[in-house]
Amino acid sequence: MEFTKMHGLGNDFIVVYGESRLPDNVSELAVRHCNRFFGIGADGLVYILPSDKADFLMRIINSDGSEAEQCGNAIRCVAKYVYDNGLTDKTELTIETIGAGVQPVRLSVEDGRVRQVRVDMGAPILNGPDIPTTVEANPVVGFPVAVDGTEFRFTAVSMGNPHCVIYVDDAAGFDLYRWGPLLETNGLFPRRTNVEFATVRSRDRIEMRVWERGAGPTLACGTGACATLVAAVLDGKTDRKAVVSLKGGDLAIDWDESDGRVYMTGPAEIVYSGTAE
Ligand SMILES: N[C@@H](CCC[C@H](N)C(=O)O)C(=O)O
């Protein structure tokens, strides 16, 4: 298997190009190759495939072998991969995802290489059953969830994939390993959920740490950053444009009032290419 190791703010992926469809054993491949001790090591396995609706199709398999509907950091990596490898010369292109439809992306190029990618992440889904959560509300803001004898308040948002945003006093010092898995698998979320722990630092800055569905703690989550900004706006805590600071770095997120869509801007990096058995 020819692959390229890439990352978006430390959220890392094994990127594969050249197949016409997902291999039948893709879950097994993801579990094996994403393993950080016995494999290449990554948060997910990403395939760039042909699309009949867009310039390219992205499929992302989490490190536990489950397929995700969307991935904000991976889509920036895909955009950089196809441009830097000469598979397109467009600086505005479209990438199809299975959960969030066709997403327009805009590349900032310097010296022939993509440095930043702005992605139109689409409109957030706010209706409880569509996220999905069992909470029948639209939007789902500030609902209680009790885990292990502790009650949290959460706001649920889907960016094509489900997110549960919880405000805490100190996101950077929060015990992700204790609470993340309990919330990811809570019965309120029938397809499990990504969990964001957020601390609002100002009207235009949020600090956030993430426990990802199917991948555990990662250094950054693009869809999670978008969901966190949307939650903070719904909660009246920030303006519609803010920087979300993650362990791996910053993403600029803008929930545009005129079209209701969320725009995410951030970097993507190539680490190395290789061959795996
Ligand atoms: N890291 C991603 C999200 C990847 C998928 C997620 N784990 C899920 O299962 O929904 C991002 O940058 O958005």
Image (spheres, grey):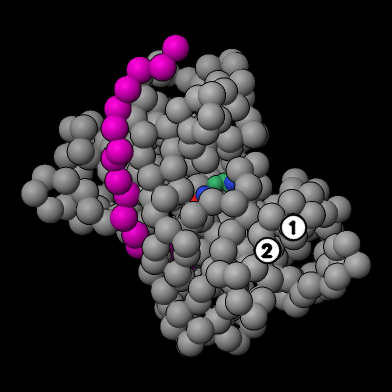
Residue extent of the magenta highlight:
262-277
Q: Where's residue 253, x and y in %?
A: 42, 69
Residue drawn where x is 41% and y is 17% of the image:
276
Does 14 appear above or below 148? above
Would you say the beta carbon of the disc 2 residue lies within 8 angstroms of ligand 1? no
Residue drawn where x is 17% and y is 39% of the image:
89
Image-quadrant location for residue 9: bottom left
Is residue 266 within the magenta segment? yes
Which residue is the site of mark 1? 178
Q: Residues within 10 Å of mark 1 (few under 14, many from 20)?
A: few
Query: Element type at marker 1?
Result: helix
Does 220 appear above or below 257? above
Residue 149 visible from this viewpoint: yes
**Residue situated in front as seen by the camera: 113 or 35:** 35
Question: Number of marks in the image?
Answer: 2
User: From this viewpoint, which residue is outermost toward the right?
Assistant: 149
Residue 120 visible from this viewpoint: no
Report the quarter where the C terminus lies: top left
Residue drawn where x is 55% and y is 81% of the image:
200
Is residue 191 within the magenta segment? no
Query: Element type at marker 2?
Result: loop
Horizontal relation, residue 59 to residue 138: left or right: left
The answer to whether the residue labelled 2 contacts the one labelled 1, judged by CB atoms less than 8 Å apart, is yes
Which residue is the site of mark 2? 175
